[in-house]
Image (tube, helix red, strand yellow):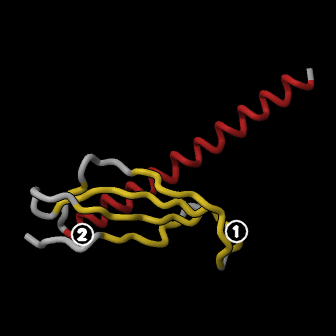
Amino acid sequence: MLGWIFFLSLLALLYLFWNRQQQARIKALTAVRRHCAEEDVQLLDDTLQLVSMAVRNGPGGRRLHRTYRFEFSSTGDERYQGQVILAGRSVIGLRLQTHRIQ
């Protein structure tokens, strides 16, 4: 009986972690789309790639920092890379690689 309780608790924790990951990814993707529109560049493939995840100390205490990479184009010919960093649920950095302007 105790084994089942442990197993179900583990499943619930895994689901909560996955759900928070999805919420963070959506928040990051929304920020990237908005920034790309402001910079007049095109987000390619409409996807983010999780590059790193680490717990770090900061002004608000310990938070999970996630770094996502994405690709964009300014002219439609070349692909450039960008990066967005989240601390918890807050976007703390968004950078675009130096790119050609139309």
In x, y percent, where is residue 91? 48, 67
Q: Position of residue 72 (x, y in %)?
A: 24, 59
Q: Residue furthest left?
A: 102
The number of discs equals 2
Mark 2 Cα within 10 Å, few/some/many (few <14, many 20+)?
few
Which residue is drawn at the image coordinates 24% and 62% (left, top)? 80
**Three-letter code, disc 2:** Glu
The quadrant in which residue 3 appears is: top right
| Residues at circles 2 and 1 in contact by the CB criterion of under 8 Å | no
In the picture of the structure, the residue carrying the numbered disc 2 is 38
83 vs 6: above or below: below
Tag 2, which secondary structure?
helix
* Residue furthest out toward the top: 1
Label ID, residue 30 = none
Which residue occupies the foreground of this view, 99 or 31?
A: 99
Q: Which residue is drawn at 19% across and 63% down?
A: 41
Residue found 49% across the figure and 72% down from its top: 92
Q: In this view, does 34 lie to the left or right of 21?
A: left
Amino acid marked by disc 1: Arg
Q: Mark 1 points at which residue?
A: 62
Q: Left or right of 84: which side holds 70?
A: left
The residue carrying pointer 1 sits among few (fewer than 14), some (14 to 19) or many (20 or more) residues within 10 Å by Cα, namely: few
- Using the rendered view, name the quadrant where residue 28 is placed: bottom left
Q: Quadrant of the C terminus?
A: bottom left
Q: Quadrant of the N terminus?
A: top right
User: First in sequence: mark 2 or mark 1?
Assistant: 2
Mark 2, mark 1: which one is toward the viewer? Answer: 1
Residue 23 x, y percent position in the rendering = 52, 49
Q: Residue at x 31, y 58 (%)?
A: 33
- In the image, taking residue 44 as reference, residue 101 lies left or right, namely left
